[in-house]
Image: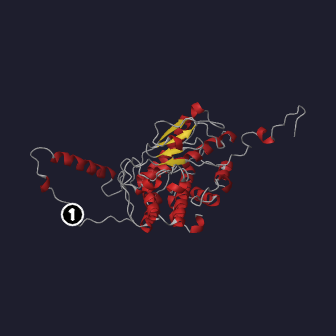
Amino acid sequence: MPSSGGSPVLAEREYRPADAAPIQRFDQRPRFQFPADPDPVASPSSAAAAGSGSAAGASGLPPGVDATAPRQRRLLVPAIALGCAALLLLGIGAGVGLLWLDQPGTPAASEQPTASSEEDPVDPAQWRPLEEGEQPEGTPEELLQVMATNPLTAATLSVPAGCSLPASEGRVPDEELQAYLEAGASCLATTWGQALQEQGVEFTAPEVVVHPSAEPPAASSCAPETFTGTAPRACIGDNTLYWPAEWDPGFSTTSAVESPQLYMWHLSYSYAVFPVAATSLHSYYGALLDGLEGDAAGSEQMRRRYALQQSCFGSAAAFQQPTGPRPTERVEEFVTSAEAQADPASPAEPSAESRAAWVNAGRDANGDLSQCITWEAPADQVD
């Protein structure tokens, strides 16, 4: 309706207080990227992803995931009777032994005992930590079994004590955002770190880097052209979560109570890719897609299962936070609704209804990640 001066009157919604304004729809999901493999011969997954950019259909990963090549991972330590430290010492001892054998006066290499030919063969259907650059083998059925029984499926996320974010109302100013996100990330590091430690998997918390939306970080392992500025980007190669400072999917329309909840929600969703990578699941997943080459429907279903698992993990971690950053009331109602989910851009992406269903599964899991096993769910639950 025009005003007496001839200029239009501002819409009523612009006058609403923050706690009454609608939260914006979460159209932009976090983006993830694994580093390109320098040796394409050794990694069929990276060859398949070459030139795909961020297209989910080309790389076979959820939206924003650009390749399946292994990251530069730190040592993964399986849980064995001797304990994590003992296995690490054994690994170091082997290297020292090789150096010792090179010294004058030491026994000839031929005198070393040879590896037993009767060693148990590797079971491709059994999860194990992968070495850097290693590509798992196995049939699609065997690799699917790994995805469904990996250590995360037996993990339980804890509620960190004393987790809180700095006071804020609406969108956090750019100059305060780095410290704000680091506070939230430290809570998630506790939640995920303890869960993985109990499963015998070492987890190194990622760094958080805030950058101007229009200026992609020059030192990132992710290609500059893959930063959109409209969502966080998790780069496994340098173990860093990059957050565009100007990104505002609803932060400016939330109150002092809701702001930390909404920030933690998006942070938790982005963060979940790092514990997944710590268990080598991205490499197993890449091998699974390689095995399904030529089966478009099967490949698309696996991509949806992977994306929905990510949604469930992120939700489970967000709802395992203490009062304050944990989503409640209006934020909880919004983030768990189908209306908050982006519509699929291809058959490889899950429907908004399926994504919301698995977000709710994560919320209701009370930290029990066995509730997020999308790999065993009926096909109609991962459409």
Residue at position x 17%, y 46% in the image: 100
Residue, far left: 105
Most foreground residue, 59 or 95: 59
Instruction: Name the image quarter holding residue 173.
Output: top right
Helix or strand or loop: what does disc 1 sit on? loop
Q: Give the camera-side residue of 186 and 62.
A: 62
Question: Residue 56's spot in the image, x, y percent?
Answer: 54, 54
Residue 139 visible (yes or no): yes
Residue assigned mark 1: 116
* Residue 101 higher or lower than 252, as above or below: below
Residue 63 location (% of width, % of height): 56, 52
User: As shown in the figure, which amino acid type bears the numbered disc 1?
Assistant: Ser
Mark 1: few, some, or many residues within 10 Å (few <14, many ≥20)?
Answer: few
Q: Relative to residue 346, is residue 45 drawn left or right?
A: left
Residue drawn at (23%, 67%) of the image: 118
Q: How many marks?
A: 1
